[in-house]
Amino acid sequence: MITKDIVVIGTGFSGMGVAVKLLEAGRTDFVILEKASDVGGTWRDNTYPGCECDVPSHMYSFSWRLNPDWSKNFSQQPEIWAYMRKVADEKGIRPYIDFGVEVTGLEWDDERAVWTIHTDSGEDYEARMVLSGVGGLHIPNIPAVPGAETFDGPRFHSAEWDHSVDLTGKKVAVIGTGASAIQFIPIIAEDVEHLTVFQRTPPWVLGKKDNPIHPTRQKLFHRVPGLTRAYRNAVYWALESRAIAFNGHVNVLPIAEKLAKANIAKAIDDPEMRRKLTPDYRLGCKRVLQSNTYYPAFNRSNVDLVTDHIKEIVPDGVIDASGTKHEADVIIYGTGFHVVDAFDFLDIKGRNGLDVGEHFRKNGVETYMGMTIHGAPNLFLFLGPNTALGHNSVVFMIEQQTKYVLTMLDEMDKRGVDVVEVTQEAQDDWNEEIQRLVSKGIWTQGGCTSWYLDAQGKNRTIWPKFTFQYWWETRRVIAEHFSWRSSKKAKTAA
């Protein structure tokens, strides 16, 4: 058993960010558990062709580690991952990481006020506090299609891209048209013999101002004090303005929808193909995507779009609902991740044996501030329920949550307690307000179903306000929203 004051799970932006701030605060009694052999989280794992961010580079980075050297407005995966590895080295957090250790479960001991962190390494950890940075985009969602196991060729999810499979000259079936799929489809279409894309619902795809950042501008960022931050601030407010349309002011959206439809009309030659690719729901109801190459890919003679549902997979292809068989040598799933149901894959036992996953399945995924759960003391989540964004950078949200956790640790020290737990009343009030606001947003009113929604149709994913409001609401700990106590262990130590 390895004992630490704090256990951090994951080395994505969340885990790395909080580790850096713990060190800066002089809190060195912690360990970061990372299942892989290097830092990076999503940006380490996703290596599919064309993988890049859809948030501008200067905003998709730490505010305390600006990068004047971004090469593009929207950076690709290798550059983002290189940035993260550089931050880990510069800030000295690698000695605090136990690599190759995957967390399999958490169990709270209320009498001793410690979490036992079970891992697949055969050695457990104990800690007063657990900070979970596992994120929502790490468990691939592979649909259960009848006959999938009978397929003779390779099958893989975009997040687990099999680079040993040469797609050149192959017949490839892509299932799904989400954020990852629209990036890799245009690239593999150039190499495959034939590409069949299975689309359940067409996404809204806007053009992307994905220009290289000129070396002259990079030099200016280096030489002019404050210019990089000023540029980042300008990007922040430009992105923040998009929340006006998404957060209930849907009358603004027709302008963007006209631009998106014009993008389709300009890019697609065939009227029937344009019809298939045009959404019948409001822009923003699902995640809004950006690409300059996705629509033109469907003008290629070797690319087909199938909008019928998939009936089954057979050894040599995919059969759609009409009974048509589409031959395939390789199947690639571009079907996203388990997000609102991610807790189904985490074994968390809280106070009095509370099974957090089971509780969420029965009652809905509810937390306080998207970070902490009644019944699970001393556990804080990063990018938890209703703190994801449709309009700005989640790194901003991560930084607010990091500051909140550090403030909470200071408050616990000041009070001389080692256990903190949000009250049921505070959690209920927070969720009631969030659901009231989110019900007015385009994600609920837009006429679609999406991964933002849970099985009851409630949006448990999106933050329904401006991000600066989250900054304001997390600037301090409201003491009456929590119960504070000292465990027997703490009293004995005293």
Image (cartoon, helix red, strand yellow):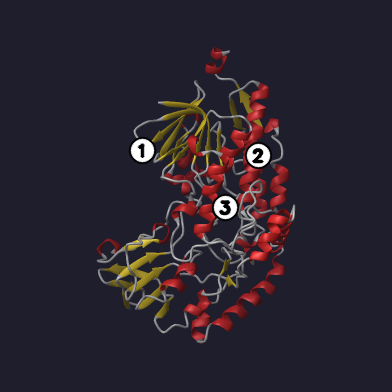
Graded by Cα atoms within 10 Å as few (under 14), some (14 to 19) or many (20 or more), the crowding at tag 3 reads many
Where residue 206 sits in the image (x, y, percent)? 60, 72
Q: Which mark is residue 461?
A: 3
Mark 1 residue crowding within 10 angstroms, few (<14) / some (14–19) / many (20+) = few
Quadrant in which residue 287 is drawn: bottom right
Q: Quadrant of the N terminus?
A: top left
Q: Give the distance between the C-alpha atoms of the residues marked 3 and 1, in whole angstroms.
A: 29 Å
Classify residue 454 as left or right of residue 440. Answer: left
Mark 3 or mark 2, whichever is nearer to me:
2
Q: Name which of mark 3 and mark 1 comes first in the sequence.
A: 1
| Residue that label 1 marks | 120
Cα distance, mark 2 to mark 1? 30 Å
Residue name at image x 55 percent, y 57 percent: 452
Name the residue type under label 2.
Answer: Lys
Residue pictured at 46% horizontal, 42% vertical: 357
Camera sees residue 13: no
Q: State the residue position of label 2.
A: 403
Q: Amino acid at mark 3?
A: Thr
Horizontal and vertical percent position of residue 414: 68, 23
